[in-house]
């Protein structure tokens, strides 16, 4: 009988996994309760105290909630991007994520009930608790956020339980990440002081933490299945521990940077300066910083010392990973304590105006031409997106040239211009004034949907990515494999079809502006960000159908492209004329509150002028792009025919002349 491999013998079994999970939970709870006790978070309040059940039960339930969320997100991420499929490790990671999402949903329901008791100040046995709880869950922002998170966690559990392919794990990851986002709208981030920055930074922080912590837990969970035969099932793939650990290390490094950046931004908003570090909240922040530095040191140790030795000492990875998870559990406890501790900077600024309360930030000065280009309103999410797009593209070009391949300079210039324009639209003057008046909003919208996308499309990012991203050979899906899956997906084939893209591009204007969606995008941060993604995406799809060179959806012949462009732009002009001649105010409640005393109808008509007039320049650019592409296509076709004629002695022309000769000979007797 063959002796068991060292990997199998050294890897942690079920008892080790249970002990590690217990240690993580105990560390989180110990740090949580200690921090709350020191910060006074466990002291009963004078008015409306719901009792010790809520004071102690809510932090504990929230800790279980957060740890389960981390394992759900991390498990789906590991299955979708790190593990080969099919393999026992992939199945275990996906099922663990599904179970964790189920625990997350149950804990979320408990957190919802306890939070309602905490806010209402009454126990469930009270006569009117049911009605007050329903009102809390349906009408209060905090209650709605917790309810949406709980429902989405249950959906993620269902998706994960049914997943049999990487696409299922990816959908589970998407739903789990979506379940995290409502949490960024609750707690301290729901206040009016720097609301947009607080929400964005907290949302990014939650995504980074859960992928980092949960990913490590999932890797440790599948560790016993690495380095051994995948079993008797046909088609199962082996999992190499060194490859898995190396891939996770790269993900962990990115998560560390994201957590550090978003944490610094969020803390700067809440502390209000260095003096805030002397408060109880500041002490908890310092504790999280210490934990983050320690985890960074663990990561460096993994990269430099542990990963090169994994082939012979897999137990070293297990021990260090377990220690990391315990420290991560303690950091999670600190995070929950932070969410229940008062901040040095109040969530609500009593000196702010009604308009500033709505905007979530100070009002910008009066608009001038100079301020349109110099005023800033940084959006952390779009700053990161723009920076990643720009840096990633330039690194791809550098990689191509380092191996001796060329890349057109014009494409690089278009991409750089598009990224800079995107940053300006989302974090410069258009962002600062885009919610102050309808006309400035329309100018921001036109730039985002008609000026930025053509520049990005001409950069050919998909072609560059496919030429530079490494391909995987172990049947797992990395960035290149997922990009190919999206490019060749049925969904992109439908929405990327020129007619569908044109309908989305032009038709969504009517649906958006003449429905409650417009005011929802003005009043809520999530709605505003979704609006930005939608119009940037529809603009990109439409421009790609006309002038794109990347692989993807169907592109019609050039004459049809011109007809489609002119028809779509005519509809776009009709939308502008409708705004100019219309008398119905759009989002009147919003604009009357943020800009009182403004002639809203005249401003809306100016917005119509912008929608009609600013579309002319991008239209001309797109027409020129289609014409140039048409000309180049004819030139390429002529060159192809010339090369073919040179190879075969112009056989096609000779065959044509022979056909004419045969026809002439056939007609000769008739003469």
Image (spheres, rainbow, N blue to C red):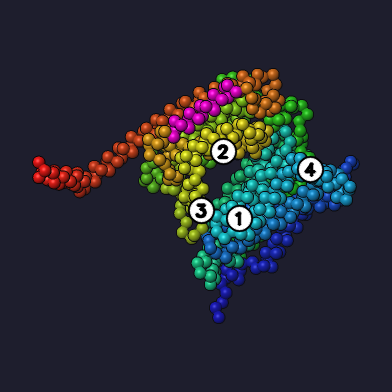
Give the residue at the far front of this rendering. 670
- Where disc 3 sits, the SS reads loop
Of labels 4 and 3, earlier in sequence is 4
Q: Which mark is residue 136?
A: 4
- Where disc 1 sits, the SS reads helix
Q: Are marks 2 and 4 in contact (CB under 8 Å)?
A: no
Q: Which residue is mark 3?
A: 478
Q: Are marks 4 and 1 in contact (CB under 8 Å)?
A: no
Q: Residues within 10 Å of mark 1 (few under 14, many from 20)?
A: many
- Mark 2–mark 4 distance (CA, rounded to whole Å): 31 Å
Q: Which residue is mark 2?
A: 534
Say which quarter of the image contains residue 21.
bottom right
Residue 191 seen:
yes
- Where disc 2 sits, the SS reads helix
Say which quarter of the image contains residue 667.
top left
Compared with 201, 586 (above or below) is above
In x, y percent, where is residue 91?
A: 59, 63
| x 53%, y 29%: residue | 446
- Mark 3–mark 2 distance (CA, rounded to whole Å): 25 Å
| x 53%, y 63%: residue | 86
Say which quarter of the image contains residue 530.
top right
Closer to us: mark 3 or mark 2?
2
Closer to us: mark 4 or mark 1?
4
In x, y percent, where is residue 513?
A: 60, 31
Q: Which mark is residue 76?
A: 1
- Mark 4–mark 3 distance (CA, rounded to whole Å): 43 Å
| x 50%, y 23%: residue | 613
Q: Residues within 10 Å of mark 4 (few under 14, many from 20)?
A: many
């Amino acid at each position: 009988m063959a002796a068991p491999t060292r990997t199998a013998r050294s890897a942690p079994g079920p008892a080790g996994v249970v002990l590690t999970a217990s240690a993580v939970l105990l560390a989180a709870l110990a740090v949580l309760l200690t921090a709350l006790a020191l910060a006074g978070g466990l002291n009963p309040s004078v008015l409306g105290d719901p009792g010790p059940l809520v004071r102690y039960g809510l932090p504990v339930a929230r800790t279980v909630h957060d740890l389960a969320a981390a394992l759900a997100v991390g498990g789906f991420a590991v299955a979708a991007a790190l593990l080969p499929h099919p393999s026992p490790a992939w199945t275990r990671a996906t099922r663990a994520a599904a179970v964790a999402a189920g625990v997350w949903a149950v804990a979320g329901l408990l957190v919802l009930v306890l939070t309602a008791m905490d806010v209402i100040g009454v126990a469930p046995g009270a006569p009117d608790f049911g009605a007050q709880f329903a009102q809390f869950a349906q009408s209060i922002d905090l209650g709605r956020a917790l309810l949406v998170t709980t429902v989405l966690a249950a959906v993620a559990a269902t998706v994960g339980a049914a997943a049999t392919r990487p696409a299922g794990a990816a959908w589970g990851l998407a739903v789990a990440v979506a379940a995290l986002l409502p949490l960024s709208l609750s707690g301290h981030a729901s206040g009016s002081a720097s609301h947009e920055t607080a929400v964005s930074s907290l949302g990014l922080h939650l995504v980074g933490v859960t992928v980092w912590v949960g990913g490590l837990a999932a890797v440790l969970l599948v560790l016993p299945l690495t380095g051994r035969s995948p079993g008797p099932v046909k088609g199962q793939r082996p999992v190499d521990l060194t490859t898995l650990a190396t891939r996770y290390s790269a993900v962990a490094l990115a998560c560390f940077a994201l957590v550090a950046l978003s944490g610094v931004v969020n803390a700067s908003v809440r502390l209000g300066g260095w003096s805030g570090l002397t408060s109880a909240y500041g002490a908890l922040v310092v504790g999280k910083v210490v934990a983050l530095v320690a985890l960074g040191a663990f990561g460096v140790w993994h990269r430099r010392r542990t990963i090169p030795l994994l082939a012979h000492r897999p137990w070293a990875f297990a021990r260090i990973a377990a220690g990391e998870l315990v420290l991560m559990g303690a950091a999670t406890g600190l995070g929950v304590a932070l969410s229940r501790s008062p901040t040095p900077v109040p969530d609500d600024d009593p000196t702010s105006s009604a308009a500033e309360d709505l905007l979530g930030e100070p009002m910008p000065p009066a608009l001038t031409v100079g301020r349109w280009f110099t005023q800033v309103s940084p959006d952390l999410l779009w700053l990161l997106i723009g920076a990643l797009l720009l840096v990633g593209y330039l690194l791809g070009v550098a990689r191509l040239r380092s191996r001796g391949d060329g890349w057109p300079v014009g494409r690089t210039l278009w991409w750089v211009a598009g990224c800079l324009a995107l940053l300006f639209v989302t974090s410069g003057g258009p962002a600062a004034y885009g919610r102050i008046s309808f006309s400035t909003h329309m100018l921001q919208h036109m730039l985002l949907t008609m000026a930025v996308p053509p520049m990005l499309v001409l950069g050919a990012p998909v072609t560059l990515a496919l030429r530079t991203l490494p391909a995987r050979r172990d049947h797992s899906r990395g960035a290149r494999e997922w990009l190919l899956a999206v490019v060749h997906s049925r969904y992109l084939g439908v929405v990327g079809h020129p007619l569908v893209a044109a309908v989305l591009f032009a038709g969504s204007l009517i649906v958006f502006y003449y429905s409650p969606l417009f005011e929802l995008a003005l009043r809520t941060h999530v709605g505003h960000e979704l609006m930005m993604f939608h119009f940037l995406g529809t603009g990109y799809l439409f421009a790609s159908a006309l002038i794109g060179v990347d692989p993807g959806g169907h592109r019609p012949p050039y004459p049809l492209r011109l007809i489609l462009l002119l028809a779509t732009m005519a509809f776009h002009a009709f939308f502008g004329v409708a705004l100019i001649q219309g008398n119905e105010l759009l989002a009147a409640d919003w604009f009357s509150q943020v800009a009182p005393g403004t002639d809203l109808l005249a401003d809306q008509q100016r917005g119509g002028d912008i929608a009609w007039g600013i579309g002319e320049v991008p239209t001309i650019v797109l027409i020129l792009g289609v014409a140039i592409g048409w000309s180049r296509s004819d030139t390429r076709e002529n060159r192809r025919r010339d090369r073919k004629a040179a190879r075969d002695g112009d056989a096609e022309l000779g065959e044509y002349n022979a056909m004419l000769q045969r026809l002439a000979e056939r007609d000769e007797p008739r003469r």
